[in-house]
Image (spheres, grey):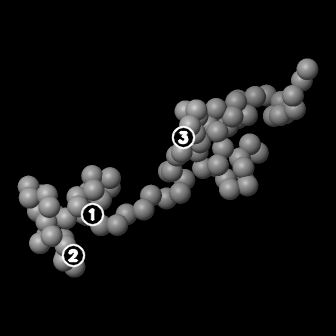
Amino acid sequence: MCKVDGCDKKSVYKAADVCQKHYFRFMRNGTYDLVRKPREQFERYSPNGYRFIYKPGHPVASKSGWAAEHRVIFYDNSKSKSLNCEF
């Protein structure tokens, strides 16, 4: 049986003496407890490889609060803070 208190599943990882759920939880979080990261620490990647970060309220962020990191950096470093395209 799994060594984590309250878990009645069969131990499949004999060296760690834990079930599959707790083994992978430990590999992700470093603890057997259910730990969720604050949303600000989440990052996503698009299929094209762009990194998206959670920046609610930022001018280049979407309604859900996610913004492409390269756009955030460009906007923060631009002097005019204008996002209008010029032809």
CA–CA distance in space, label 3 to label 1: 25 Å
Q: Quadrant of the C terminus?
A: top right
Query: Looking at the rendering, which quadrant does residue 71 occupy?
Result: top right
Q: Are marks 3 and 1 in contact (CB under 8 Å)?
A: no
Which of 37/26 is in front? 26
Query: Looking at the rendering, which quadrant does residue 64 occupy?
Result: bottom right
Query: What amino acid is labelled 3 in the image?
Result: Tyr
Q: Are marks 1 and 2 in contact (CB under 8 Å)?
A: yes
Query: What amino acid is labelled 1 in the image?
Result: Lys
Query: What amino acid is labelled 2 in the image?
Result: Cys
Identify the residue position indicated by label 2 in the image. 7
Which residue lies at the image location 13% right of the left edge and 58% below the top edge? 13
Left/right placement of residue 70 relative to residue 43 reads: right
CA–CA distance in space, label 1 to label 2: 10 Å
Q: Residue furthest top?
A: 87
Secondary element under disc 3, as helix, strand or loop, is strand
Q: Is residue 58 visible?
A: no
Which residue lies at the image location 54% right of the left edge and 53% below the top edge? 40
Q: Which mark is residue 45?
A: 3
Q: Earlier in the sequence, mark 3 or mark 2?
A: 2
Q: Position of residue 39 (x, y in %)?
A: 53, 57
Q: Earlier in the sequence, mark 3 or mark 1?
A: 1
Q: Position of residue 86 (x, y in %)?
A: 89, 23
- Crowd band around label 3 with a 10 angstrom C-alpha radius: few (<14), some (14–19), many (20+): few
Identify the residue position indicated by label 1 in the image. 21
Against 51, is 18 above or below? below
Q: Position of residue 48 (x, y in %)?
A: 58, 32
Against 65, is 73 above or below? above
